[in-house]
Image (cartoon, helix red, strand yellow):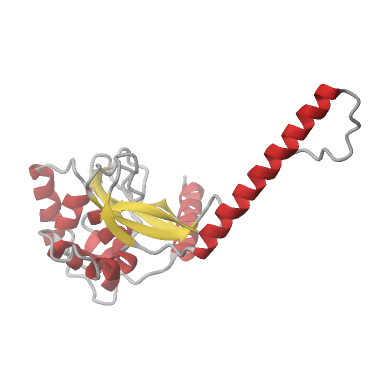
Amino acid sequence: MCADLSSVDINDAQDAVHIRRQRDCCGKFAEKLTAARGARSISAVSDIIERAKTGRAKCRGCGVGIASGELRFGEALPNAYGEGEALTYYHLHCAACFRPEKFLPCFQASEHAGSADATWLTQAAEAGVQHPRLPRLVRAERAASGRARCRHCQELQEKGSLRIALHIFEEGRFSPAGTVHVACAPAYFGTKDLVERLKRLTPELDSALAAEVEQQIAQAPEPDPTSGSDEGPSVARAREADDETKRSQGA
């Protein structure tokens, strides 16, 4: 912010020159800022699929950098630092898994819909639209302790056991939302078609671990077609807070 200099008593010539320069600088900056904001409000930002111009941008979904020249999905969201909208970027497979309702129409309308990976990307996005909880799936992992409870069955997760990490998209960002047992995942998400998605989202998932995940999912009961309904971010957060309260009271 520029200081209000209109009431300053100028007695020294050097001070007068300095203050005039400050006024000129503030005035030019204000003009540029107004012009920039006007340009942003006039030009609409839309979702886009393009090649990354540099390797500096990170994927909003997984947090890993997007290599220069790699295809990426840019989602238009309200600008958190100013007026108008700004683009947040994703790897294509992260966008298909985490933001399917925005990614699918953009991808199908793009010139890249016939690429080598197009079939899987389309199917992954369609599954995410069909099963609203599926975009919460982040990765497969081992339980670091024995204190966390499964979001589906509410049972403790044994240390070292396989589980699936969850997140929720809210106000333009992802927030952690607990975990579920791998065996509970089909019932929670409403589908058993999870293995390839987990492989894509968990680079460290080696063949032995992938086989273990696949076995547990295959042995799980068939999910109810009506399960996996979307409870919404606010309800999910309230449920998580309630679960935490119950755990603390039982401790």
Residue at 82 percent of width and 38 percent of height? 5
Left or right placement of residue 147 versus residue 22 in this view: left
Residue at 17 percent of width and 70 percent of height? 222
Please, is residue 171 above or below residue 205 in the view?
A: below
Q: Residue 58 location, x and y as percent?
A: 34, 44
Q: Quadrant of residue 66?
A: top left
Q: Nearer the viewer, residue 97 or 243?
A: 97
Q: How many marks?
A: 0
Please, is residue 181 above or below residue 118 in the view?
A: above
Q: Residue 42 location, x and y as percent?
A: 52, 64
Q: Residue 237 location, x and y as percent?
A: 47, 58
Residue at 13 percent of width and 65 percent of height? 114
Q: Quadrant of residue 21?
A: top right
Q: Quadrant of the N terminus?
A: top right
Q: Residue 165 location, x and y as percent?
A: 31, 50
Taking the view exactly as shown, the residue that stands out farthest to the bottom is 226
Please, is residue 75 above or below residue 24 in the view?
A: below
Left or right placement of residue 213 versus residue 171 in this view: left
Residue 178 visible in this rendered orientation of the protein: no
Residue at 77 percent of width and 38 percent of height? 3
Residue 210 visible in this rendered orientation of the protein: yes
Please, is residue 134 above or below residue 227 in the view?
A: above
Q: Nearer the viewer, residue 121 or 37?
A: 37
Q: Nearer the viewer, residue 82 or 103?
A: 82
